[in-house]
Amino acid sequence: MHFSSTKEELLNAIQVVQRAVSLRNPLPILSGIKFETGEGSVTISATDLELGISCSFPAEVSEQGKTVLPARVITELARRFPDVKIFFKSDPLNGSVIIQYGKSEASINGYPVEEFPEFTIPADNTKFTISGEILKDVISQVIFATARDENRPLYTGILFEINNSTANIVATDTHRLAWRKILLDDIGDLDINLIIPGKTLNELTRVAGLSDRLDITVAENQVIFKTENICLISRLIGGNFPNYRQVIPSEYISKTRLKTRDLIEASERASLLTREGAPIIKISIENNILVVSVNTEAGRMREEMSVYHEGEGLQFAFNARYLNDALKAIGTDEVVLEFTGPLSPVIIKPVEEMEYLSLLLPVRLREES
Amino acid sequence: MAGEILLCDLDAFFASVEQRDHPEYRGKPVIVGGRAGSRGVVATCSYEAREYGIHSAMPMARAVRLCPGAVFLPVNMDHYRRVSAQVFAIYARFAAQIEKVSIDEGYLAVQAGAGVETAQRIRRAVKGELGLSVSVGISSNKLLAKMACDLAKPDGFSELALGDVPKIIWPLPVGKLYGIGPQTREKLYRIGIMTIGQLARFPRAELIKIIGGAAGVMLHQRANGVDHREIQVERRVKSIGEETTFPQDVYEQDTILTTLLELAGQVGHRLRREGLVARTVTVKIRFSDFRTITRSQSVHGAVAGGEAICRVVQELFLAHCGQPPWRLVGVQVANLDSWEQLSLFEEKDERLGKVVDQLRDKYGPDIVKRASLIPSAEKAKGEPGEF
């Protein structure tokens, strides 16, 4: 193997793939990044067996070959290289790789390349395309509702329910749920349900550009996202996603319209007085005044804001973090909260007509009503 | 202790709540307690009822005889607990250190000199916001605050300084001193001590001979108005557990699983009575050689129901039970909280749990049992044909 590239091209590619490197995995090979030359380009890849990312960058290749280098060393080195042409060359004597930059050189010991897991794509698969801009937008609106708890893998994923030209995209950790519906053009008569790990989609939004078209391939228990130079391959989550349609209320008993920013700021201030891990705040609405309050061992706080309320007055307790996650994901200046009962979900949605909403369940206080 | 201590005690709490919520009961004797026909006792009665000689802990049957025309009401504990929480939330505005003694009584620590002012403000707030009257005793220690409160009742406040003890406390009958029950009172009567003052001046060494060391010293101090007890701010329950030691070593897993079901039910009941939910569940297993292990599991969200607790402990038991025989199993819940994040998809057997709790609160833990916990001989008695 022998190639050269610029520091910038190399570093960009490394930063894309290094998120899939698994430094704590018992398999040492997974702490490496694989380099493989092609025609006028080099493809590097990393995987933790759940998620694999590869990225190609232009290079002058004078001898084909492949190698696996320790991710930590190569990432930190690439960051610190001077801004010159970098040469990579295998040393046939001991299997190490000699890296030359300017008048300096380093020799890095690699891993046996044949141990690196292959990204295989089963032949029998389904393909469709989606715009990077739309996908990023959708993911940012629902991903907050995924669970972080790995003991409940189903809820760590996002459901893509694709039927003909529409896709329902849903995430829930059972305490909240976010739903968005989008139209997909030219995907034919596709009918599939995918549960894609939240982590995968998070990485995808990080590496994919807004202008990219994403080619999506679904095969058995895997999904592959491809742009011009990046490929992200992930396992899918098995199991049946809960019936989200059943829990989205079709009616409400009262509703409030308010400035998103006001409520976010008030509940952030109020949660400062709550115990860590339990940011429980109370919200009551009466006569177009919304009151956020807490009363804890640390102290008391009460904030009032004007809202536009239709229907009966209400009183609720919420996890402030959950509430703010939902409010921040909406991204509009004003938000509508629709209430369905004191211990039932609150529907949070933008004022504008949009096929997007999230549900948040209140907290039941055992001592006080 | 440099500050002052307030004892806030709600007047005839349960009865006052009922009179507040039902204007038609106002001005009438109201008796809250067990069923009139049963062996239940009076939990609280209104001041109107006290005029008939009725007091709490009196057998219900006797109360009925004394005042047949009274309004008799069952104990609506859930409701009183909620109101109590509202009252303590008001106290929390006035004092950082609060010791909750019971549902209607709490000690508050305030700065020296602030006692009377705080007492008045608390009484105004509780009356104004919740429509209830609270009596407040103010002093330099818990004992005198309590005695002051007794003197202030109903619907008043009073302050008692150490210097007031000889004039105000000493003439009182010795049984009025906090910590003296009927038995000690009889002992004291026998040696001629009738008033708190006589107790205070009685030679301490003699007193210790008669009623014992620690109790003698403590009572002598108290009769002199001395009390060193601090405010116990944290009375929060940290964990709740139940365990069973078997009369004989047990070899059958099914027996253990059934016992765990029963214990989990009891733990769940106590948990809900405290108004709490748990985030950690522990099983305790003791083998016949006395080797004891505990294994815990954090649950997603929280549990409060016996069934949910049972699922976790049975799973833990099956995973760690090793080889029989076993001689003890226990169920414990910890990481307790007073709030619960509701869920969209989990099923709720809550309504059933609530009914069972009410029955158990009223008639004791054995009133409702799971069919699998009833021995088969007893079960046979209840064949459907008999109903």
Image (spheres, coloured by chain):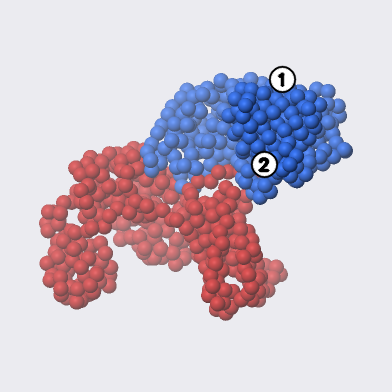
Residue type marked 2: Asn
Q: Secondary structure at mark 1?
A: loop
Number of numbered discs visible in the structure rendering = 2
Determine whether A234 is above or below A184 in the image: below
Residue A216, percent from left and from top: 79, 31
Q: Chain of mark 2?
A: A
Chain A on-screen colour: blue
Image quarter where the C terminus of chain B lies is bottom right
Q: Which tint was used for chain B?
A: red
Q: Nearer the viewer, mark 1 or mark 2?
A: 2
Q: Residue at x 27, y 72 (%)?
A: B183
Residue that badge 2 annotates: A109
Q: Which residue is mark 1?
A: A211
Q: Quadrant of residue A32?
A: top right
Where is residue B113, by image quadrant?
Answer: top left
Numbered disc 1: what chain? A
* Residue B263, percent from left and from top: 55, 65
Q: Which amino acid, by three-letter code, is at mark 1?
A: Ser
For the point 63% across and 25% down, the residue is A102
Q: Residue at x 70, y 40 (%)?
A: A96
Callouts 1 and 2 in the same chain: yes
- Mark 1, Cα crowd under 10 Å, few <14 / some 14-19 / many 20+, is few
Neighbourhood count class around disc 2 (C-alpha, 10 Å): few under 14, some 14–19, many 20 upward: some
Q: Nearer the viewer, residue B139 or A201?
A: A201
Is residue A8 positioned above or below A26 on the image? above
Residue lying furthest bottom in this view?
B248
Q: Position of residue B132 (x, y in %)?
A: 35, 44
Task: Pick whichever, A286 or B53, lies toward us.
Answer: A286
Residue at the outermost right position = A124
